[in-house]
Amino acid sequence: MSLNRATEKALARRWETRWFNGGMNTCRQVLDKPISKRETRKVVKTAAKEGAKEAVSETLPQTSGVLLPGSKPLPQEPACIVNASSTDMVLIYGNCASLIDNFPHRIIEVKGQTLLTVGKKDKGLTISGRFFSKDNRIVAELKDNRFFVNPNNYFRIERPNKHSLIVYDQQGNQALNVEYLNVSTIKILGRFYFPDRPPLVIDENGTSFGGFSLSNVCIGHAGGTEISFN
């Protein structure tokens, strides 16, 4: 007989119930005695419920959750990252990076509006920010590595693993791509919009805003906001 995953789980749960209720003797009886019709009906009913739950969880995208640190080593690019000390936190944006030793710390600001802020919690790096679409509607928010995606303003959400989040806006643009590489390093990409301003684009080629661009730049231990556009 072929069992689906939900039925297998339900059978396992019924087995555990009989084991704990009757101990080893009951276990021996179960080995020699097929499951009763009554118990089969219970299993099928439980499996149907669990199958429905699994179907819903697999269909609906995850619009909130937590980014957990991975175990990837510090990237080799940009090259200036090698100058990071053991106490530095590293935020990588495109092919640029900031080495940070004071918290909380503003990374990018546009016309007085903070896009990215990093902090330190339990010896790990945290990132916070609010990200908007072209029509000035919020797409997603990060708050100390917790993420919240507007269920009414995105095209697609991808979670390649528990360390990463990729959100596409309704125009198909990559609105946010963040990866928690390790406990002290976070990488972020995306196309970020502000009222009455051109988009700030962070991709693998660098960071650009209007006619201004940054590429292969490291900013170390800045006292105030590291990048400010007016």
Image: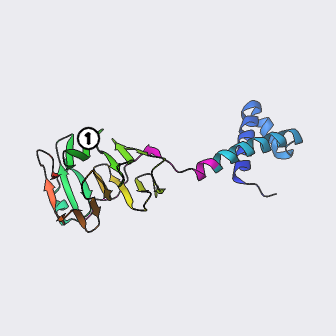
Q: Residue furthest left?
A: 223
Residue at image location 72% in from the left, 33% down from the top: 20
Residue 29, visible in the rendered structure? no
Q: How far from the left and from the top, in percent, is residue 116?
A: 26, 48
Q: How far from the left and from the top, in percent, is residue 206?
A: 23, 65
| Location of mark 1 (residue) | 120
Residue at image location 65% in from the left, 50% down from the top: 55
Specify whether residue 171 is painted magenta.
Answer: no
Residue 224 vs 90, above or below: the answer is above
Q: How far from the left and from the top, in percent, is residue 201?
A: 28, 61
Residue 174, by quadrant, is bottom left
Q: Amino acid at mark 1?
A: Lys
Q: What's the magenta region?
A: 56-76
Residue 175, by quadrant, is bottom left
Pointer 1 local density, CA inside 10 Å: few below 14, some 14–19, many at least 20: some
**168 lies left or right of 95:** right
SS of the residue at dot 1? strand
Q: Residue furthest top?
A: 21
Residue 95, by quadrant, is bottom left
Residue at image location 70% in from the left, 49% down from the top: 6
